[in-house]
Each structure stands twice: as C-alpha cells, then as structure tokens.
Amino acid sequence: MFIILGLLGFAAFITLLIFMMPKGFKTTLNEIGEGKPALVFVYDPNRAISPSQFEQMNIARDALGDTAAFLSAQLATPQGDQFIETYQAKPAELFLFNRQGQAVERGYAPKSAEELIRWIQKTE
C-alpha cells in the first residue's frame, strides 16, 4: 500500500515539475512580420543573464498570451548568426518588431517582464 502511494506521489511530483518548466522559445524567427509584435532575445548560452531573461520573457508571454511572438536568436546557429549580422546585434540584446516586421526597439537584458509587456503594448 505504501509503495503504491509512494509511486503515485512521485508521479504527481514529476507531473507538477513538467507543467512548471518554462516553455521553450522558437529560434526560427519566421514569425517576425507575421501580424503580431515579435520580441527577439539574442541568446548566448555562456552569459549568466540568459536564463533570468528567459524567465522574464516567460512571465511576459504568460501575461500576454499569443498576442506577441517570443523568439530567440541563438549564437552559432544559421538563423541566429544571420539575425545578428543583419541587425548588428550583440549577445544579450533584445529587439522588438512591430506587426509589419520593422524593428522598433532594442536594448540590453535584463529587462523585467513588466518592461517587456510595456514595450510590446506600445506596438499595438
């Protein structure tokens, strides 16, 4: 009986952890200019700021739902490197694109979820 309860408790714990994990960010960048604002974070896995910026982006995404695209331009990937070259982007930089795909804001991480939400709402 205790074994069954223990296994059920463990399964519930694992399920809870899965639901609490942050959702990933698309790195394809093809949502820029597709009819909704797009926030792009230039991701460098070697920068300590990256995980906390992703956390703030997740909070903003949860608050805004699917009204904006939250994307990542990762260093050393074809699309990420192309984005970095096109916009002369630096690691840990954030870009905001309007619905038509024009870059309207750029700045460096960290930015709080509230700042990101204000940025995105200015494009509407």
Image (cartoon, rainbow, N blue to C red):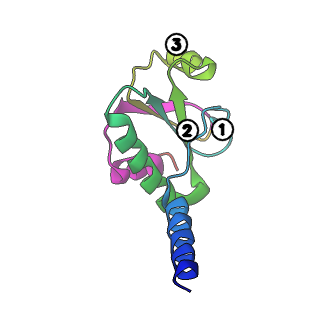
Whether residues under marks 1 and 2 lie with C-beta atoms below 8 angstroms apart, the answer is: yes
Q: CA distance from mark 1 to mark 2?
A: 8 Å
Of badges 1 and 2, the one in the foreground is 2
Whether residues under marks 2 and 3 lie with C-beta atoms below 8 angstroms apart, the answer is: no
Q: Residue at x 54, y 63 (%)?
A: 19
User: What is the span of residues highlighted in magenta in the rendered image?
Assistant: 100-122
Q: Quadrant of residue 105?
A: top left
Pointer 1 local density, CA inside 10 Å: few below 14, some 14–19, many at least 20: some
Residue type, numbered disc 3: Glu
Quadrant in which the N terminus is drawn: bottom right
Pointer 3 local density, CA inside 10 Å: few below 14, some 14–19, many at least 20: few
Mark 1 and mark 2 lie on one chain; the one further toward the N terminus is 1
Mark 2 and mark 3 lie on one chain; the one further toward the N terminus is 2
- How far from the left and from the top, in percent, is residue 112? 32, 48
What element does badge 3 sit on? helix
Can residue 77 be found in the magenta stretch?
no
The count of marks equals 3
Mark 3 and mark 1 lie on one chain; the one further toward the N terminus is 1
Residue 104 drawn above or below residue 70? above
Residue 23 numbered mark, or none: none
Question: Which residue in the structure is indicated by mark 1?
Answer: 31
Pointer 2 local density, CA inside 10 Å: few below 14, some 14–19, many at least 20: many
Q: Residue at x 42, y 52 (%)?
A: 117
Pick whichever, 102 or 32, lies toward us: 32
What element does badge 1 sit on? loop
Side (left or right) of 113 relative to 98: left
Residue type, numbered disc 1: Glu
Q: Residue at x 58, y 16 (%)?
A: 82
- How far from the left and from the top, in percent, is residue 46? 38, 25
Question: Which residue in the structure is indicated by mark 3?
Answer: 85
Question: Which residue in the structure is indicated by mark 2?
Answer: 71
